[in-house]
Image (cartoon, grey):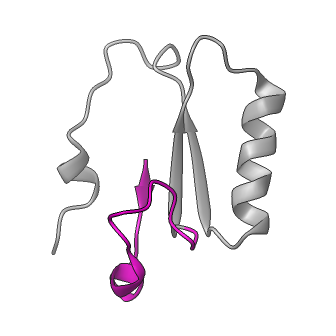
Amino acid sequence: MSFIRESKRPLMNMHLRVQRWVPGLAIEIVSANDTFEKLAQKARRYRNCGTAEVWILSAETIPGFAIRLGDLFSRC
């Protein structure tokens, strides 16, 4: 999942699966086959390319936790 700044919206090409720019925030959700090294490498790659924030979330860390994505990015 990623957060895209309003300023990059005109760059978005809905015909491409992978965009040609980096998001302001990248969120990686840990899956069963992920390793720590693989996730750390992915986070480093995002940061080296200019992503301001990288979050790695593990559902196992916070049992029963749930949040609506809209609550994270509500407009003031």
In the picture shown, does residue 17 fall above or below 56?
A: below
Task: State which quadrant residue 53 falls in.
Answer: bottom right
- Left or right, 1 with reference to 33: left
Q: Where is residue 39 in the image (x, y as percent from the top left)?
A: 72, 35
**Where's residue 75, x and y in %?**
17, 71
Q: Looking at the image, which residue sits at the far front?
A: 15
Q: Residue at x 61, y 53 (%)?
A: 54
Reply above or below: 33 against 52: above
- Residue 2 on the magenta segment: yes
Up the image or down, 65 lies above or below 73; here it is: above
Residue 38, image quadrant: top right
Quarter holding the C terminus is bottom left
* Position above or below: 57 against 7: above
Q: Is the magenta stretch mostly helix, strand or loop?
A: loop
Residue 23, x across and y down, in percent: 51, 67
- For the magenta stretch, what is the residue range? 1-22
Q: Residue 14, how many percent across, how many down? A: 32, 65
Query: Does the magenta run of residues contain 20?
Result: yes
22 on left or right of 76: right
How many marks can you see?
A: 0
Q: In this view, does 2 lie to the left or right of 10?
A: right
Could you tell me which residue is drawn at 26 percent across and 60 percent down?
73
Which residue is rendered at x = 78% and y = 26% of the image? Answer: 36
